[in-house]
Amino acid sequence: MRITKKLKIKNDLGLHIRPATYIAKILQSFKSSVEFTYKSETINARSIMSVLMLAAKKNAEIKVTVNGEDAKAVIDCLIHAFDSYFGERS
Amino acid sequence: MKTKNELILKGLPISEGITIGKPYLFLKDENPIPDFDISKEDVQSEIIRYREAIIRSENDLKKLQSSLKDDDSYEILDILGSHLEILQDPFITSEIEKRICSECRNSESIFQDSIIKFKAKFKNIDDSFFQERVRDIIDVSRRILHHLRNENSLSAKKIPVQSIVISSELVPSDIAEISVGQVSGFVTQRGGATSHSAIIARAKEIPYVAGIDISCFKEENIETIIVDGSKGKVIANPTKERLDYYQKLIQDKRGFYQNLKESSVRKTETKDGFSINLFGNIDSIDEVDLVLKHNAAGVGLFRSEYLFLANNSFPTEDVQFKIYKKLVEKLSSLPLVVRIFDVGGDKSIKNHDEILKEWKNELNPVLGCRAIRFLMKNPKYLKTQLRAILRASELSKIGILVPMVSDISELFFVKEAIDSVKAEILNEGVHFKENISLGCMIEVPSSAIMSDEIAKHADFLSIGTNDLIQYVLAADRTNPQVSDIYSLLHPSILRLIVGVVKSAQKYNKPLILCGEAAADPKLIPILIGLGIKEFSVSAQHVPIINYTIQNICLSNAVKLAKKALELTSFKSLKELVESQSNLD
């Protein structure tokens, strides 16, 4: 299954190292491939460093592409992560 | 011998404190990274060598983590946790291995090349926060390179005691790994106040100044350096006078801090063994670390409205739940008092237009529809907050505190709301604390006057001196024109406090005093003498108030309070307190 969705970054500091680590940790329990696309750059969301390289700030919209058998669960988890400010105080 | 010139350099203050020491130049290995081809047969052993460097880096970090466990250094542990995750990043693992395979070159050169490309990406990003975070990646990569090159790190070097480390740049692990006795200060060319290195230096309480041109330390023969991390000053080869001046400054401070440090590990009790509960006030979840570090008895006041003042909108139930849950976890068995939203007055919400419109029409917002008054008109916000608190309450010592109560009916309103929320979440199968305690702020004069009735129904009371004083004396606490009127030391205030203390005693209910007055060491003896046994002050004031309490005799405090209650003017009360504090 392949799902594509646009998610908005809500936490004040953007996708810095802590959210990137948070995302990588969440994805560890899933099998699907997960890609983030931002400003015409597409990267592997499991890589903290690649996520950092997007330098996506607050309010940036990230195109998330999930491909694999557990895609639905992955996208639900990511929506929750983005909506809950990646566990950070906003 | 040539006399050495004193050199005063101005930089960025990063971590507070003053220190004097000998410079220790820590220059990074500037030899070029070896770059050579390897044969196809050697690829496998090269990959194994690379993997070993990663494993050794991982072991370093884990060792460092376990050595820090008792240190209360949550921030540092968090940073090291990120570093461990980075070591598993495909960018560091599979990507590099793939390149070693395909390019047949040594791992150092490929690794270095990848990191350079990574750094280049950030060159054009104009955001200091992102720039600082990249330093963590550089830190991890340097650790790996160390192991590939079999180099020593800063901690492995033999640094003389009382050294001041001078470097072009320090990565977080450099600072995390050194011992406090060995290094007494840091001076660097690059680095900012928001960096992880800065956070760690502050947690370790080592003075640190950045933004200093360090080239002069390489050339000149410098024996002594003064680092003033509070002012951001670095003085090389100080004159005799200046050295004396700073030595005296350090000694004075050391004596004071030593006392504070010793007092914070001792129990909060008066000289004659009367124990006092000292809590910390917090506005955000981060501040709880400081509360714990200073050994406070828990959080006596969590001003929950800061959750949305920062965000300009009401946080959802889930967002709130997570925050309360995290606080409960961090505090483990210690109590947490959540004051429900005190909005309105000087704390308005920009994104809620309809509410703002109503507020804008208020001529006198401090006396307007704020706190519980607002929540009663907008019960959905109250309900959301109560649900979040109750969901986080299982196995906790959470208390709910109602702000700005002017009539007992407001307390009953919240009590009923709590009961209906309890029934609701019970149906949903959520566990919560059955007998959650409900407290009442005593900050409106009417509640202070009616404290007897309130104490009968509330589980605990909390005197908010900031508002109580401003309402009783009709003096705006933000208006400098009336600042000579605004004071706790007015006979009317002391009498009201005594009344509240008596009510609380009558019904055997806990009473906390929070507000700026609780953080003023001069006022503590009189308040203890009046019968206050629990205080809640901002986290940073906990050590000084603890120290103050430990140096008070209850018997003297009671005598002082008795004398104070006989006085009838602000002037005479002020004189009494001043004469008392001069005796110490």
Image (cartoon, coloured by chain):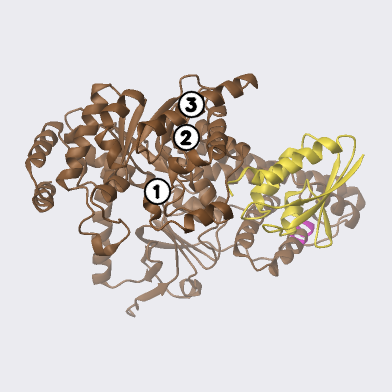
Chain colours: A yellow, B brown
Residue at x-position 92% and y-position 39% = A1
Tell which of B58 and B413 is nearer to you. Answer: B413
Q: CA distance from mark 1 to mark 2?
A: 18 Å
Which image quadrant is residue B131 in?
A: bottom right
Q: Chain of mark 2?
A: B
Q: What x and y, as percent, mark residue B107?
A: 78, 54
Label 2 secondary element: helix
Reading the image, the residue beneath label 3 is B416
Query: In the rendered view, does B456 fall on the left or right side of B387?
Result: left
Q: What x and y, as percent, mark residue B79?
A: 59, 46
The outermost residue toward the bottom is B2
**Amino acid type of the residue that numbered disc 2 sits on in the rendered structure:** Asp
Q: Is residue B91 visible?
A: yes
Reading the image, the residue beneath label 2 is B70
Tell which of B135 and B314 is nearer to you. Answer: B314
- Dominant SS of magenta comes to helix
Q: Is residue B551 visible?
A: no
- Looking at the rendering, the stretch of residues picked out in magenta corresponds to B108-113
Label 1 secondary element: loop
Mark 1 or mark 3, earlier in chain: 1
Which image quadrant is residue B536 in?
A: top left
> Which numbered tag is attached to residue B181?
1
